[in-house]
Amino acid sequence: MARASLLYLGLVLCVHSLTAQDAGQIRTGQEGGGQEDGEWFTGAHGVQDLAQLSWDYLQCWFSPEKCEESERPADWGWPTVGWESLQFLSDWYSRVSESGDYAYGRISNNLTGLQWDLSTRVHGQHLAKDLIVTSFQDFLEDSGPKKPLILSFHGWTGTGKNLVARIIAENLYEDGQRNRCIRIFFPQLHFPHASHLEVYKVQLEKQLRDISLRCSQPLFIFDDADKIPVALLTSIIPYITQSETQQTPSIFIFLSGLGSTAINEVALTFWRAGRHREEITADHLDRPLKASIRDQGDSVLLWHLVTEGHVDVFVPFLPLERAHVKLCARDSFVARGLQYTETALDVLTKGLLFVPKEEKLFSAQGCKLVAQRINFLQ
């Protein structure tokens, strides 16, 4: 609780610098995995205040044990709290939370732990688990110089993309997501205004360069990658196309909802044919996923990464069924030290929305609302 309070105090100090006019510019919109997801589920989300928005973005990385994956609007920004303020806040929190005993860039590369955590904490994602374990085994066990590893996570909201990214950070770095060799970028926080793109390009390039120089294994995570301005590609490209003679084995992970409709359609087709979802292979999803991304056009940064062949591994996250949501609920009960029954799990999932309208097969928001519903049941 002390760590959470320190973070919240820092956020309050940053928010205090906003003028009333600036605060009025904070906008809300609809969340989803891109425009195409309107075919599956459309819904307006409530307005949330600035502190809650900040909490949604930062809490899950700085304090995952307190993370509840709540909804966040897709179209909003901080007008005056800039990149440097956010980076200062995250660095400050890292130092305070470790009581000054903070070694720079400690690396563990615990593949056994990675495999165990993926198998026990992530539900309904057999493809993602296999692809990630294989990718990191190949990458980390190569003792020679190597090119950066570029992963692109695709899937609907609440299917586990952020959870898997945290699990990777926790098992590859001794300090987990607080390790200073890790940088997480949120477009709505770091690149909110088109008028400042030239500044963002310089700042982003500086971040990538500094971490690459200081760390033997940098990890860069780009959340909501479909919302990253395409102009920033020039800052990223030099670091994802490093020659194999480079000594720094960087890791890039891009998370987005692009292609989620294509993934969902394949999963639904298998279900309608009476086939188990575990029969779905990467080959079944590779072509429709890439085609869906290419259909977005060259105004999307991920389009360039795909068409220019920079992505090493596409990691699809399948939509979650009722049984998977119940497992998420069980995990939430256990994490809080609460007793649960099958009846309680059934009650919790009954209040969630499942789609499509006819089959009501997939949770419209995955496991995202599970924690909040447990609070409601209590």
Image (cartoon, grey):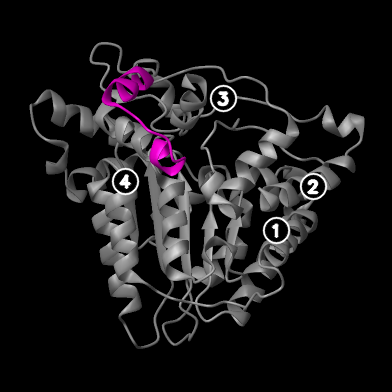
Q: CA distance from mark 2 to mark 1?
A: 12 Å
Disc 4 marks which residue? Answer: 316
- Residue 175 to residue 51: above or below: below
Q: Few, some or many C-alpha atoms within 10 Å of disc 3 (few <14, some 14-19, many ≥20)?
A: some
Which span is picked out in magenta? 332-349
Q: From the viewer's side, name the closer residue of 47 and 376.
A: 376
**Horizontal and vertical percent for residue 6?**
74, 52
Query: Going from the N terminus, do you reach mark 1 or mark 4 first?
Result: 1
Disc 2 marks which residue? Answer: 9
Q: Is label 1 or label 4 in front?
A: 1
* 341 within the magenta span: yes
Disc 3 marks which residue? Answer: 30
Q: CA distance from mark 1 to mark 4?
A: 30 Å
- The total number of labels drawn is 4
The amino acid type found where label 2 is placed reads Leu
Query: Going from the N terminus, do you reach mark 2 or mark 1 first?
Result: 2
The amino acid type found where label 1 is placed reads Ser
- Residue 114 to residue 50: above or below: below
In the rendered image, is residue 240 in sight? yes
Q: Few, some or many C-alpha atoms within 10 Å of disc 1 (few <14, some 14-19, many ≥20)?
A: some
Secondary structure beneath dot 3 equals loop
Q: Which mark is residue 90?
A: 1
Secondary structure beneath dot 2 equals helix
The amino acid type found where label 3 is placed reads Gln
Q: From the viewer's side, name the closer residue of 345 and 277.
A: 345
Residue in view at x 33 percent, y 51 percent: 315
**Horizontal and vertical percent for residue 222?**
54, 54
Secondary structure beneath dot 4 equals strand
* 52 within the magenta span: no
Answer yes or no: do the residues labelled 1 and 4 have beta carbons within 8 Å? no
Residue in view at x 71 percent, y 43 percent: 192
